Amino acid sequence: MDESNRIGSREFEYVREVLETEFRASSGSVMMRRLEEAFAKRFGVPYAVSFVNGTATLHAALEAAGVGPGDEVIVPPLTMASTTFAVLQANATPVFADVDPDTFQIDPRSVEERIGPRTRALMPVALYGLCPDMDPIMALAAKHGLFVLEDDAQCFLGGYKGRLVGTIGHAASFSFQSSKHLTSGEGGVVVTSDADLALKLRRVCSLGYAGVSASKGKITKKDIQDPDYERHVGMGWNYRMPELCCAVALAQTESIDALVAARVEAARLFAEAARGCPWLVPQKVPVDRTHAYWTWVARLDHPKVSWRAFRDAFMGLGGHGIYAAWKITYLEPMFRDMNLLGREKFIPEARRAEYRQGLCPCAEALQPKLLQFRTNYWRREDAEKQAEILTRTIRKLS
């Protein structure tokens, strides 16, 4: 990887290879196969299935696991709403568990309280690049026979008790959206060690084609040159990742260590700049976990300075913009108005009544206080400058 750029010569080389095929069917899915093999190898799992984006990954994984109408899926409310969208797309009901006030991750104790007779799956999110406490989550899943889908869109190469994040649940979803550690503009991938699940994932992803497999993403010309060929063994979506995106994602996967390291170093500089400040409290990282730092985030506990005042002071000194945490999902207008494209019919009235202020008090208290600082600096001097501006901002407001 060119250390001053996110996109290097290898990305251009692989894209050129695809363009030179002129998208001939006989040359299709080469980059898809190479990407999936490289990603699976890096994460030490047998199967990786690529997708058009990191929401399709979640939806397909739930469908492949058999989640559907009448089922409930437990999710955190403090994250991008795509996690919940995937549950709704599978015609299931989202149930929200609260978060830990220090790590900001879904709290296993709240998860346990939310498990009921209709619970079918758990979807913990590695928020900001930090893994939730997975051992008790997996224990709950084993006890109740639940499917665990890790939403690791923000966590590439994170660690949990010596294990690589993404290899703990029954399946894990990663995103290649433009803000993520690895990007191809859009895209995503699901990894799993379960051969049957991988096959079902592939078929959900690929229009239910009979000719695909856990490791094969495209039917062959020989298959379809037969008038008696039965193509579709089941319902599926066209969620396949385009070859051009696969080419870029492959190059990014081959540079994954450097791309993640750049963000981790930027986060270290921000943490050092905030060290000792009593009213800027970073996300707690337990000693048994390794943070991947999609962003460096801190809770603003200043008694007199508002979120916007801090943001304005930081930017006034030359800082880049600070991102706010997403609105708590169940407090978004779509839930208030039950505007869910017909999926509201799958949500019982008792669950609908829960979607209001007070359901997850820790998450609700945290959300307006969280300051999310960019870590996507590919030149160290740029990260150093932003960290130095944070130091000056803290001094100004103290």
Image (cartoon, helix red, strand yellow):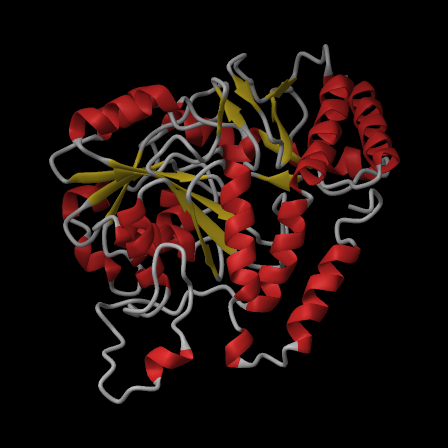
The residue depicted at 72 percent of the width and 41 percent of the height is 376
Q: How many marks?
A: 0
Q: Position of residue 50 (x, y in %)?
A: 47, 56
Residue at point 29% right, 86% down?
A: 226
The reply to whether residue 341 is in sight is yes
Give the farthest residue toward the bottom: 227
- Of all residues, the one furthest to the front in this rendering is 222
The correct choice, above or below, for 188 with respect to 95 in the image is below
Q: Position of residue 224 (x, y in %)?
A: 34, 82
Residue 34 occupies which quadrant of the picture?
A: bottom right
Residue 246: image quadrant is bottom right
Image quadrant in which the C terminus is located: top right
Residue toward you, 251 or 300: 251
Residue furthest left in the image: 117
Q: Is residue 311 left or right of residue 210?
A: right
Residue 276 in picture, x, y percent from top left = 72, 10
Query: Is residue 326 at least partly visible in the picture?
Result: no
Query: In terms of depth relative to the viewer, which is nearer, 341 or 244?
Result: 244
Residue 371 place in picture, x, y as percent: 63, 32
- 287 or 17: which is nearer to us? 17
Pick the residue in front: 292 or 8: 8
Q: Residue at x 74, y 35 (%)?
A: 262
Vertical relation: 107 (above or below) 41: above
